[in-house]
């Protein structure tokens, strides 16, 4: 008797032993690209002002805080990498909390992330993107708030549709935007290097980088908060652990490579900002954040 074939099969899932699981399609480069693209976003454009401001315009302290935030993020993401390597299943925090504490804490965790943490973070990124996209069309005037909010909503809806269609499509879009973001940051870095090399005045702020007012404990903590905002997204790779090839090797390698690349980019971008702009000019920009 012939076995009947299913009418349709999701290309992104696989069925083994009666259980539906996701196919492992993502390699090392896909994982690094996804993580870098998830981290680099609005933060590097809005946080430098706040970090420098709470560092009391002390360039040396501000750069040390950026580096320290990167080191803290590496420690955090290595802890997540161990979880993802040992338990390579989809779900991220939800799966880990459910496995360790049970279904009720896991439900509260995912409910909190879904209703408060992720929407506020995504809203901040979408609004920042809409701000920078619409500002060139209005010259020196600020774009209308209704336009920025409409663009932000459209961006979030488009990304939601893309992510719900296919993991490969989402990865392809993620890779493209990661390349574009890295190209934009590379242009900023290259221009800063050229300015640093050709203009003797550009290097003067770094000669006495630590000569200035030292921030107190509260100001340092606030500067760390603003810096850590820019590194947000370091834990996203665990949501895709079930789709990564050879997760025990690729997850740790991916997070280390991605975090090191992000730290280097962030430090070079901040140095480029301070090469072209004075600290007072940098903190006079109107873009800032107050939510995570």
Image (cartoon, grey):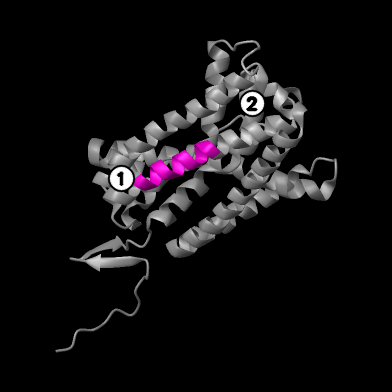
Q: Quadrant of the C terminus?
A: top right
The image quarter containing residue 185 is top right
Given residues 45 and 272, the one toward you in this image is 272
In the figure, 264 relative to 16: above or below? above
Q: Kindly give the residue lying farthest to the left in the view shown.
A: 1
Residue 202, percent from left and from top: 74, 29
Residue 189, percent from left and from top: 64, 41
Counting residues from the start of the chain, the first of labels 1 and 2 encountered is 2
Residue 139, percent from left and from top: 85, 45
Residue shown at 35% from the left, 37% from the top = 78
Q: Counting other residues with Cα less than 10 Å from the Cα at mark 2, is it few (<14), some (14-19), or many (20 or more)?
A: many
Residue shown at 43% from the left, 37% from the top = 112
In the figure, 173 relative to 259: above or below? below
Element under disc 1: helix
- Asked if the stretch drawn in magenta spans residue 256, the answer is yes
Q: Give the CA distance from mark 1 to mark 2.
A: 33 Å
Query: Is the stretch drawn in magenta largely helix, strand or loop?
Result: helix
Q: Which mark is residue 84?
A: 1
- Asked if the stretch drawn in magenta spans residue 99, the answer is no
Q: Kindly give the residue lying farthest to the bottom in the view shown.
A: 1
Q: What segment carries the magenta color?
A: 253-264
Q: Which residue is mark 2?
A: 50
């Amino acid at each position: 008797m012939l076995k009947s074939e299913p009418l349709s099969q999701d290309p992104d899932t696989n069925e083994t032993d009666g259980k539906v699981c996701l196919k492992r399609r993502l390699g090392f480069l896909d994982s690094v690209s996804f993580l870098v693209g998830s981290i680099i976003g609005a933060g590097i454009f809005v946080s430098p002002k706040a970090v420098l401001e709470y560092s009391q315009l002390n360039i040396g302290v501000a750069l040390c805080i950026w580096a320290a935030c990167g080191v803290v993020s590496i420690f955090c993401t290595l802890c997540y990498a161990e979880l993802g390597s040992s338990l390579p299943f989809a779900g991220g925090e939800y799966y880990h909390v459910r496995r360790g504490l049970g279904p009720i804490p896991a439900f509260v965790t995912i409910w909190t992330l879904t209703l408060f943490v992720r929407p506020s973070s995504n809203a901040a990124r979408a609004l920042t993107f809409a701000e920078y996209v619409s500002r060139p069309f209005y010259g020196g005037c600020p774009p209308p708030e209704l336009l920025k909010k409409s663009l932000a909503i459209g961006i979030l809806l488009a990304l939601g549709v893309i992510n719900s269609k296919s993991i490969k499509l989402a990865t392809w879009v993620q890779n493209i935007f990661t390349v574009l973001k890295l190209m934009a940051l590379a242009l900023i870095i290259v221009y800063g290097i050229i300015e640093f090399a050709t203009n003797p005045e550009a290097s003067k702020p770094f000669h006495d980088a630590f000569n200035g007012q030292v921030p107190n404990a509260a100001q340092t903590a606030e500067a760390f908060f603003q810096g850590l905002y820019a590194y947000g997204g370091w834990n996203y790779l665990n949501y895709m652990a079930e789709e990564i090839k050879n997760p025990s090797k690729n997850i740790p390698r991916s997070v280390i490579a991605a975090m090191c690349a992000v730290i280097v980019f962030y430090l070079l971008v901040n140095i480029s900002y301070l090469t072209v702009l004075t600290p007072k000019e940098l903190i006079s920009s109107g873009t800032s954040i107050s939510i995570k």
